[in-house]
């Protein structure tokens, strides 16, 4: 396994560069740039629905800014690109380019904005803890995953409480 690790790191970095170029080749949402200075872009599949998913991500960021400013600032600091892409997982993070990839297809429920905000906080926490060098150290990577999931649950609970009992 120790011989495969450098090869897997190289493949992961190469895929990250391809997705980074793909994300910058797509048109970006101007409203997200105004909100947080983050490039929000989507695959052609998401663009076909006239930007409703892009608006949901913007609304989730506005909700997060209103309820939990620390998490909002964490996202602004540690994520440069949010790329909506249909992949096998709901959310993933690529350290090359600080890209958060979200898959929002087929999801429609009343807590969608809260879940989107939770995914963004999870990616930003993971980015903060892993960093560009520590990302490939498996023990540190597992700890970063665990802490980011805990932070995601905390933010989701906080947002649910704020939306059900507005102050």
Image (cartoon, rainbow, N blue to C red):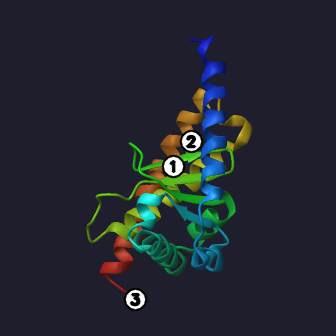
Q: Which mark is residue 144?
A: 2
Give the percent coordinates (x, y) of residue 156: 40, 64
- Which badge, 1 or 3, is on the more N-terminal residue? 1
Q: Quadrant of the N terminus?
A: top right
In x, y percent, where is residue 152? 45, 56
Q: Residue 160 sits in which quadrant? A: bottom left
* SS state under label 2: helix
Displayed quadrant of residue 51: bottom left
Q: Residues within 10 Å of mark 2 (few under 14, many from 20)?
A: many
Give the foreground label among 3 and 2: 2
The residue indicated by pointer 1 is 148
Which residue is drawn at the image coordinates 63% and 11% (left, top)? Answer: 3
Report the disc number at residue 109. none
Q: Residue at the spot x=31%, y=69% of the render? A: 111
Residue at 66% of width from left, 35% of height from top? Answer: 13
Residue drawn at 58 percent across, 28 percent down: 139
Relative to 152, residue 39 above or below: below
| Mark 2 touches mark 1? (CB < 8 Å) | yes
9 to the left or right of 109: right
Q: Tell me residue 83's x, y (percent).
A: 54, 57
Marks 2 and 1 sit apart, C-alpha to C-alpha, by 6 Å
- Dot 1 falls on a residue whose secondary structure is helix
From the image, state whether disc 1 or disc 3 is nearer to you: 1
Q: Secondary structure at mark 3?
A: loop
Residue identifier under label 3: 167
Q: Give neighbour class at mark 3: few <14, some 14-19, many 20+ (Cα, 10 Å).
A: few
In three-dimensional space, the C-alpha distance between marks 3 and 2, rounded to whole angstroms, equals 33 Å
């Amino acid at each position: 396994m120790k011989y495969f690790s450098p090869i897997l790191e190289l493949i992961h970095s190469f895929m990250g560069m391809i997705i980074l170029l793909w994300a910058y080749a797509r048109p970006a949402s101007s409203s997200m740039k105004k909100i947080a200075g983050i490039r929000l872009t989507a695959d052609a599949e998401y663009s076909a629905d006239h930007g409703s998913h892009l608006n949901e991500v913007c609304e989730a960021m506005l909700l997060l800014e209103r309820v939990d400013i620390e998490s909002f600032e964490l996202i602004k600091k540690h994520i440069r690109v949010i790329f909506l892409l249909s992949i096998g997982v709901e959310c993933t993070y690529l350290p090359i380019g600080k890209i958060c990839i979200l898959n929002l297809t087929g999801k429609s429920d009343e807590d969608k904005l809260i879940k989107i905000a939770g995914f963004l906080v999870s990616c930003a926490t993971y980015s903060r803890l892993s960093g560009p060098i520590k990302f490939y150290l498996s023990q540190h990577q597992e700890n970063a995953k665990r802490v980011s999931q805990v932070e995601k649950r905390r933010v989701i609970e906080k947002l649910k409480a704020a939306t059900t009992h507005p102050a």
